[in-house]
Amino acid sequence: MHFSLRPAGGAAPLNTTEEEERTMAASAEFGMDQLPSDPLLHILSLLDYRDLVHCSYVSRRLNELSKHNPLWKSLCSKHWLLSDTERLQSGVSWFCLFKQYYRDLGRYIQYYPVLKRAWEQLKSFLQQRCPRMIASLKEGATEVELNDIEAQIGCRLPDDYRCSYRIHNGQKLVIPGLMGSMSLSNHYRSEVLLDVETAAGGFQQRKGMRRCLPLTFCFHTGLSQYMALQPAEGRRMYESFYPCPDQTAQDPSAIDMFITGSCFLEWFTTYVNNVVTGEYPIIRDQIFRYVHDKGCVATTGDITVSVSTSFLPELSSVHPPHFFFTYRIRIEMSSSASPEAACQLDSRYWKITTSDGNVEEVQGPGVVGEFPVMTPGKVHEYASCTTFSTPSEYMEGHYTFHRLANKEEVFHVAIPRFHMVCPPFREPAVQTVRVSIHPWASLRKSVDHSSLPVCVCAQQKASTNHTPRLDDHDNDGEFCDGEGDGDDFGDLRGINMAALEGAWCPHI
């Protein structure tokens, strides 16, 4: 054995004799054996599992210390989220338990703790709020099953997706779906997290959607979110998206995309975070994907108004530019208000500003055909919708009220400014020949919802007389089993509807 020591500053190395080397090695070995265990264990506790294993090959002493149970207890907790109860049930040491999990799930070690924690948080949060949803979750798939799916579709599944499906293999085909719902008066959407076998049945090979695997499915609209398993046709590897047919293209395979995530891990954990933090409200056993900006709150006297919004991809398109939003407004009178403060809403006023700088004003009586009476502690909520030819906009305005005790006392209550922004979208990489379409008029009207064909507005071809409209008489809070045209993606429409356990159409 021969080595050299190089002093700081780049000076020439000092060669040592073999005799000196043996003396130094013996001294080092003697020092290691004589060191007390506590400082060594402290040093080992700072190492990750790989380095700890490597240390076990250095010397007999380190080999013994590296198997110290508390070291592996910490690593089991960090990487596999295991508790004392689970260790006792296994009947083996922490070191052996780590090895067992590593043999089974080692390829996913960078994803497992994040995804396992997300699943546990989601189940804990929904257990009391949405028990039917939790009951629909399926046991995790095995490695063999996932390998078989890869062989079936001829594509590799990303490790973060595989890891999540080792924990839970999606959910049974039920309503409500785990991945969120949305309801307007004649439109209903609820997305199921597909199990991997059903997803493989909807795997896309056709032009415009090649190598795309469905992640979710809605029975009412036919809507699915997809994950790109290969970079093709303008898509990036493993990103998730809602497909959006280009309705102006002569080629039916021209598919635009509303991007929902850069990878499965981001897509799923972001959604879970929005659920467990209360960002997405739970309404009658369902998760509604409304987003509430904490700044979208305004208080006037005893009345507070807050707003949350949501983008509906199934009723939107990039070509022609048609972006559909729904918003939910909560009006609340403070419980400490005096009885004399009771009042009734008479009318509404909106100022709407689009991203291209256009400003419009809309006003009309009541809200969604109602004139709510506000008394101390009362809450009134309603939902409405609007369409725009620009991908972002903001709205603000006020309500006009009168006091019940004195109808002559009229006052305004501010509606906070709230922004509506569609997710990022991307066009296909291929050249697309589009048919000529008359530009959409900018006029918006406050109309009765019965005149707005929301279930088909995003599916029909654009026409010269189609006008986006602001609908402030939209939703009376009911869910409806819509008959939307949906899309035409894949074999998912062949799903046996008899498998839809407990299908229902709840009413709020």
Image (cartoon, rainbow, N blue to C red):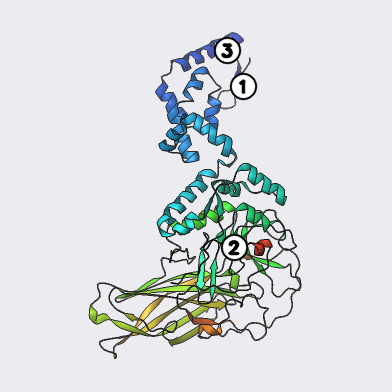
- Residue depicted at x 53% and y 86%: 445
> Mark 1 or mark 2, which is nearer the start of the sequence?
1
**Which residue is disc 3 drawn over?**
21
Spot occupied by residue 413 in the image (x, y as percentages of width and height): 36, 80
Q: Say which element carries label 1.
A: loop
**Which residue is disc 1 drawn over?**
12
Q: Amino acid at mark 1?
A: Ala
Q: Quadrant of the C terminus?
A: bottom left
Residue 25, compared with residue 221, is above or below; it is: above
Q: Nearer the viewer, residue 238 or 498?
A: 498
Spot occupied by residue 53 in the image (x, y as percentages of width and height): 54, 28
**Which residue is disc 2 drawn over?**
498
Spot occupied by residue 391 in the image (x, y as percentages of width and height): 58, 72
Q: Say which element carries label 3.
A: helix
Please give the count of numbered marks on the rendered protein.
Answer: 3
Q: Is residue 149 left or right of residue 64?
A: right
Residue 140, compared with residue 458, is above or below; it is: above
Label 1 crowding class (10 Å Cα cut-off): few <14, some 14-19, many 20+?
A: few
